[in-house]
Amino acid sequence: MDIPLTELFALASLGLVTGFLAGLLGIGGGMVMVPFLTFIISLHDVNTDLSVKMAIATAMTTIVFTSISSVRAHQAKGNVKWDVVKQLTPGLLIGSAITSLGVFNYLHGAYLGIIFALFITFSATQIFLDKKPSASRQFPAKWGGLMAGIVIGFISGLVGAGGAFISVPFMLLCNIPILNAVATSAALGFPIAASNALGYIYAGSSVPNLPPHSFGYVWLPGLIMIASMSVLTAPYGARTAQIWPVKRLKQFFASILYILAVYMIFKSMF
């Protein structure tokens, strides 16, 4: 691939960092990858509209691989709530299809960037304030779980994330402990990422002026480098999640989201 070594090094470093964060926070890494990938892809004479879309699609596709490594590490600790995964997955697939095969293709990249920033700011605030749910609040019944899954899958597809920025706060509100919420979110990342990735590839197959090494909206150099590196560090993030204080874990998660929200608003508006 005719990619400068400095870019390959940056992509590899991004993979190592996001893999660790995926294991630590169950976020799949998409929240971290999108701003950096937007910048790197734009270096290849790609306008902001297309670079944001490709960054979102590429970040989401890497989560297919990151989530597998992360969930294996969490499952070894017995923290994944598979009953929640089973209940949310049908809705996740529906919501993801609506986004990747329809809405995503027609929204301007700058709008997607702003949507990305607004939703992660909201999620970060909810987590940072550490609002306590009602002690009697439980995970919703069948149809409630389906609708929650549709919302999570739809919004995740818009911003290229594995859904943790919505699913973790949602599970915390349902009185699911933070370690279980993070682990379960990692498992939810796979169906979200796989279904959206297929949609991005199909929807982008007829888009003109894509940079070299593109597969639909997915930029293969970014996918290969980040995915191969992230699987190495995801297990270490999962182990760290076991020993960090819960309050510090939440604050760290929220702080990262605030920083990235500011960048994406700046990138989308200027």
Image (cartoon, rainbow, N blue to C red):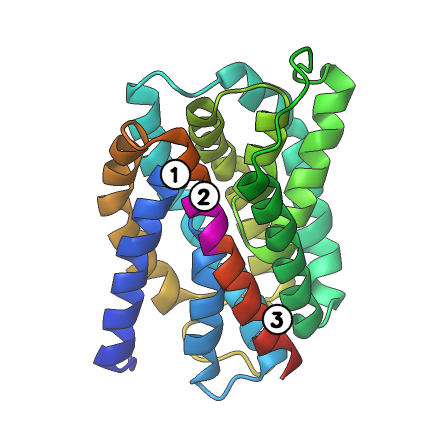
Q: Quadrant of residue 244?
A: top left
CB contact under 8 Å: marks 1 and 3: no
Which label lies toward us, 2 or 3?
A: 2
Q: Could you tell me residue 96's position as x and y percent?
A: 65, 44
Quarter of the image with the N terminus is: bottom left
Residue neighbourhood size for the residue with mark 1, other residues' Cα within 10 Å, grouped as few (<14), some (14–19), many (≥20):
few
Does 33 lie within the magenta span? no
Residue at (64% x, 35% y) in the render: 92
Kindly report the distance in space between the C-alpha atoms of the residues bearing marks 2 and 1: 5 Å
Q: Nearer the viewer, residue 183 or 216?
A: 183
Confirm or deny contact between disc 2 and disc 3 (CB under 8 A).
Answer: no
Residue at the spot 22% in from the left edge and 79% down from the top edge: 5
Instruction: Name which residue lies at 35% across and 68% down.
Output: 221
Disc 1 on helix, strand or loop?
Answer: helix
Q: Using the image, determine if residue 18 lies above or below residue 163.
A: below
Report the span colored magenta.
251-256
Residue 251 bears which disc, if any?
A: 2
The reply to whether residue 37 is visible in this rendering is yes
- Give the answer, above or below, for where 31 lies relative to 108: above
Label 1 sits on residue: 248
Question: Which secondary structure dominates the residues rendered in magenta?
Answer: helix
- Residue annotated with mark 3: 265
